[in-house]
Amino acid sequence: MLSRAARPALRAGASLQTRAVVPNAANFATLREIEGRLKSIRNIEKITKTMKIVASTKLNRAQRSMQDSRVYGQTSNAVFDSAETKALEGEDKKKLVIVCSSDKGLCGGIHSGLSRFIRRKTLEEPRFDLVLLGEKSKAQLQRTNAQDIVLNFAGIGKDLPKFTDAQAIADQIVLLPNEYSSIEIVYNKFLNVQSYEPTVVEAFSEEAIAASANFSAFEVDEELLANLREYALANSLYWALCEGHACEISARRNAMENASKNAGEMINKNQILFNRTRQAVITGELVEIITGATASEDM
């Protein structure tokens, strides 16, 4: 049994230990939280680096496909330029705008750029009908231009665009009940691996082709004008889809590269925080040991 002189010292030592344990318990909890945060960020960094590698691998193939598709679209445009084809202005006919987007995200603001372009176009021009290729543009434009959407396609952008896909889309557009004065295709034009811009390519109606000033020089039968118009629309769609696909892959690669850099910076900051917190825990434990030893000597 302790003497009355030793009891005050024992109570003082116990109170010191109680006050020191609470901060250390909080520090240990903080260490576990930081460690869990570091683990999550490292997993995210692995994913973003893997997605960057996959996008880099796909980019070369997408660029080759884009170069091949330009032959289709530019050839059709060259024919109409030679024929001096122009869109017919009709008061009772609306314009049809086709937006070439995709279903995939994680590629920066490439889809938002097309949606902003369409919203600006809505303010500058009268109402026009919309055909949306891809779920991303549908989700964004449905909030502001839902009454203008007449047709939309899903399953776009899963792989390299094919001419058969563009032909199937053109078949559905031709079957629309309304007659349009002109058709415009809005897509992202590939400038380089770092930049792109929304661009418009025009697909002319059958009446506009027939009314061309120099179209008679090509000696095309009037019965074939509908086929020519549909084929030219498919060519332009294929060109736009391939250009947009290359822009999307390039934008995804850049986005994943930036995400990997940001994850690396977060890992460094949290690692420093973890080291400092662990050092504070060790220092607190040393203080407890020294305080306990001092109290024991005083007893």
Image (cartoon, grey):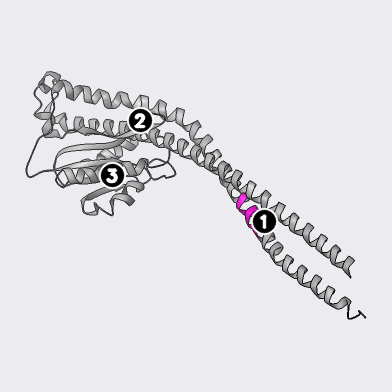
Tell me if residue 172 can be seen: no
Provide residue 194's location: percent of width, then percent of height. Answer: 41, 31
Q: Which residues are magenta?
A: 30-38
Judged from the image, the secondary structure of the residue bearing numbered disc 2 is strand
Q: Which residue is mark 1?
A: 31
Nearer the camera: disc 2 or disc 3:
3
Q: Earlier in the sequence, mark 2 or mark 3?
A: 3
Q: How far is the residue under mark 1 from the one under mark 2?
A: 47 Å
Callout 1 touching callout 2 (CB < 8 Å): no
Q: How far is the residue under mark 2 from the one under mark 3?
A: 18 Å
Q: Split into 4 quadrants, where in the image is the N terminus?
A: bottom right
Single out the residue that lies furthest toward the left.
91
Q: Residues within 10 Å of mark 3 (few under 14, many from 20)?
A: some
Callout 1 touching callout 3 (CB < 8 Å): no
Q: Where 181 sits versus 10, above or below?
A: above
| Kind of residue indicated by mark 1 | Leu
From the viewer's perspective, is 163 left or right of 274? left
| Kind of residue indicated by mark 3 | Arg
Provide residue 139's location: percent of width, then percent of height. Answer: 33, 51
Q: Which residue is mark 3?
A: 116
Q: Which residue is mark 2?
A: 190
Judged from the image, the secondary structure of the residue bearing numbered disc 3 is helix
